[in-house]
Amino acid sequence: MKEYLEALLDDGFNRYCIDCKENEVTHCLVSYGTFVCATCASTHHQLYSMQNPGAISVYAKPILTDHWDNYQLSSVVDGFGGNEPMFLFLKEYELDDETDIKIRYQTRALRWYK
């Protein structure tokens, strides 16, 4: 499992955070099948935790230190998950330059993508 995940992270799109595009990834947003850095994972947790009324549930899972079940793994499987499909989706909906996580993830487009 670890080898498979490491191979996914070797992909250029998956190596860097889909949100900030600066930091190397450490977490996966399972609901989106994307990879993010620790800083952005923390931001997602703060903004979208279950404690916030009306918040969208987002699970930021550490990539290489946690156990993965079949559902979680299927969210990142090659060809369906990962950062490239999300990147292309964001570009198509002209959200690729939107750096504010709160604004980007509250759009109808990303609610559908989830």
Image: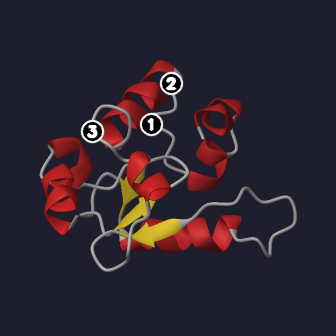
CA gap, disc 2 and disc 1 = 7 Å
CA gap, disc 2 and disc 3 = 24 Å
What amino acid is at disc 2? Glu
Res 78 label = 3
Q: Residues within 10 Å of mark 3 (few under 14, many from 20)?
A: few
Q: Badges 2 and 1: C-beta atoms under 8 Å apart?
A: yes
Res 94 label = 2
- Relative to residue 60, is residue 8 depicted above or below? above
Q: Residue 10: where, in percent of width, then height?
A: 12, 52
The quadrant of the image that shows the C terminus is top right
Residue 49 placement: quadrant: bottom right
Q: Badges 2 and 3: C-beta atoms under 8 Å apart?
A: no
Query: Which callout, 3 or 1, points at the residue further toward the start of the chain?
Result: 3
Residue 4 as seen in the image, left or right of residue 94: left
Residue 78 as seen in the image, left or right of residue 34: left
What amino acid is at disc 1? Asp
The quadrant of the image that shows the N terminus is bottom left
Q: Residues within 10 Å of mark 1 (few under 14, many from 20)?
A: few
Q: Residue 42: where, in percent of width, then height?
A: 51, 74
Q: Residue at x 38, y 75 (%)?
A: 67
- Relative to residue 49, is residue 112 depicted above or below? above
Give the residue at mark 1. 97
Res 69 label = none
Q: Which residue occupies the foreground of this view, 36 or 10? A: 10
CA gap, disc 3 and disc 1 = 25 Å
Front disc: 2 or 3? 3
